[in-house]
Amino acid sequence: MHCTPFRRLLAAVLVAGVFPACSSAPRASLTRASDDVLRAALAAPTSPRRPDAAATPSSAFGPAGERGRVGDGLLRHGSEALVGRLPSERSDGEPVSDDVPAVSALQVAPEPGSVRWQDPTDEAPAMAGSRYGIETELLQPFIPEVGVITIKATQTLWGDPGASHGDAMLGVFLRPSVSHDVVDTIDEYMASVGYRHYFGKGLHAEVQYLAGYVWGRDNLVDGKDYEGFVQFVEANVGYRFDFNPGSKRGFYVIPQFGYIQGLNEELIIGPRNGKDDTFWQGKLLVGYRF
């Protein structure tokens, strides 16, 4: 069958129209993506996954003006979460090749440098308090015939410092040349070790063991000087109040009530004239966690 010139011209027009249509691929660029393409890319959420760590530079988000391409996932910009996926096929069923730029989230985020990947399966770390602290007692240094200065360091051994937990305590007990009801003056220096158990955020009970050396001058019964190794045990209950509970660092105060008991059977500082070696006490601790 012979083609007339008219038929040849018609065939050429049809071929010229079909081939460009088949070879062209829908593209979306940073500067020319339409609103419809952008909405379509963000409207179909899927289960997120991290971008491939081995992705080429053309697959990562960069400064404004660079092409970007990621797989299905979740992008976070400030407090906004953008969930979407990029089409893996063209409308005609052909796969989208890697050299085709996809709609970038930089068109949505006004500050490209703030766009970051967040995997929702990752758990954010809890805001825990500090595991270390240092504290001292405010009242006893100024009470007549007591005059005790204490300094303690604490470390959380287990649990969350903002909830139920246990603290170890190491400290010093200083009593330099204080007027006393058994001797004229007493010098007493001890080290302490203890444990403080928090039943909740602030309520706690603690025990301490103290050991050291004491000098008593001019006993009020026989007028003699005494000295020797001394040890005590004490127990207290109290509540901790944090000045800045939302921060890992900050000051706190602890009012406590308890007693301290001497463990020595012999009279370390001489005759006591019937006075007991057990003392009820109130404390007001101030500390700093860091």
Image (spheres, grey):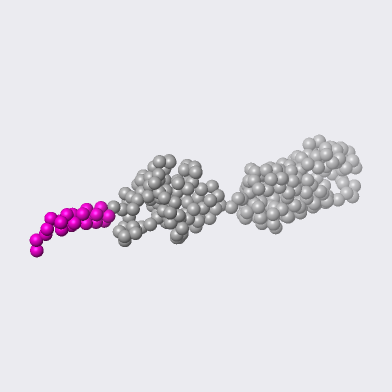
Outermost residue, top direction? 177
Which residue appears at 87% of the width and 46% of the height? 272
Horizontal side of 57 relative to 146 (left or right) equals left
Q: Toward the viewer: 4 or 124?
A: 4
Quadrant containing the C terminus is top right
Q: Please name whichever residue, 229 or 234, is drawn nearer the observer in this view of the structure.
A: 234
Question: What secondary structure is the stretch in magenta mostly built from?
Answer: helix
Does the magenta run of residues contain 171?
no
Which residue is painted at 53% across and 51% down in the image?
80
- In the image, the segment drawn in magenta is 1-22
Q: Give residue 193's position: percent from left, percent from top.
A: 69, 48
Q: Along the horizontal axis of the image, is 132 left or right of 114?
A: right
Question: Does any portion of residue 171 appear in the rendered image?
Answer: no
Quadrant housing the N terminus: bottom left
In this orientation, does residue 159 appear? Answer: yes
x and y percent of residue 85 in the render? 42, 56
Q: Foreground: 241 or 88? A: 88
Q: Tell me the residue at 36%/49% (across/down).
A: 101
Judge left or right: residue 174 versus residue 180: left
Residue 196 image offset from top left, x and y in percent: 70, 52
Residue at (73% x, 50% y) in the render: 240
